[in-house]
Amino acid sequence: MKALVGLGNPGPEYEWTRHNVGYLALEECARLLGIAGQKRRFKGLVMEGHLNQEKVVLFKPTTYMNLSGQALVELMHWYKLEPPDIFVFSDDIDLAPGQMRIRMHGGAGTHNGWRSIIQQTASQAFPRARIGIGAPPPEFELSDWVLSRWDKADSAPDIREAILLSARAGLGFLKDGIQLTMNQYNTRSRPQKAGSNQDATGGETDDA
């Protein structure tokens, strides 16, 4: 059994903010899998389905981003899931808009959702899709940037492309596991920024 988890903030006012691209990726996974009928459980919204006769769970924590770990712990306990069974979608300011990187594990960096997850579970071993939203411009505080809308920005087509690509990678994880998913999808993302210290094979060389 495996799970897909999208990080974000609940409520329509946050739907199109940069911090909520993880929610949008999860919704695209549900569409691709033909899963509907979410239920409110474990401090979040749960959908259940099957892929190739294996049960899969899709989950959105609704605790607000900085308490995501509280919801995820409850989900893990109920379904008896370990971190490597769970693929998490999140935004990433260290990737340019339109970039997407799959990782087998990693730290929290500046991301409050990941910080909560790692603190609550005492593990960094969660496979993940990092969806690039770009660093904040000089006139933005980080908190204002991640809570600003991306859908009207010039980079909106690139971010939308990364969301859709990450959703397909999530399905790849369900079918083929993390290593093959990294090999297949990290090469499909937009070219990484010059001077980046990330490799091209999915190995993690930073703490973001």
Image: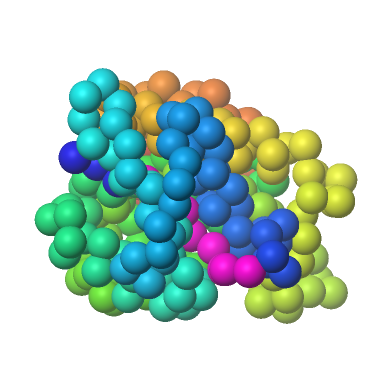
Say left or right for 149 vs 38.
Answer: right
Task: Give the position of the N terminus as an image quadrant.
Answer: top left
Q: Residue at x 69, y 65 (%)?
A: 12
What residue is at 49 percent from the left and 45 percent from the top? 26
Image quadrant assignment for residue 170: top left
Splitting the image into 4 quarters, where does residue 106 fall? bottom left
The answer to which of 83 and 49 lies nearer the viewer is: 49
Q: Is residue 51 left or right of residue 22?
A: left
Q: Is residue 158 visible?
A: yes
The quadrant in which the C terminus is found is bottom left
Q: Is residue 82 above or below residue 191?
A: below
Is residue 130 visible to us here?
A: no
Residue located 44% across and 52% down the image: 38
Position of residue 89 measured from the top left corner of the image (x, y, whole percent)? 46, 50
Identity of the residue drawn at 40% across and 57% down: 39
**Relative to 136, residue 128 above or below:** above
Q: Which residues are magenta?
A: 4-11
* Number of numbered discs on residues: 0
Secondary structure mostly seen in the magenta stretch? loop
- Measured as percent of width and height from the top left, residue 47 is found at 38, 48
* 193 vs 30, nearest the viewer: 30
120 in magenta: no
Q: State the image coordinates of residue 79 (x, y, percent, origin top left).
A: 17, 55
For residue 71, side relative to residue 52 (left or right): right
Horizontal side, residue 53 vs residue 43: left or right: left
The correct choice, above or below, for 68 with respect to 161 in the image is below
The color scheme shown is rainbow
Q: In this view of the protein, which residue sits in the foreground, 69 or 195?
A: 69
Indicate yes or no whether the magenta region holds residue 5: yes
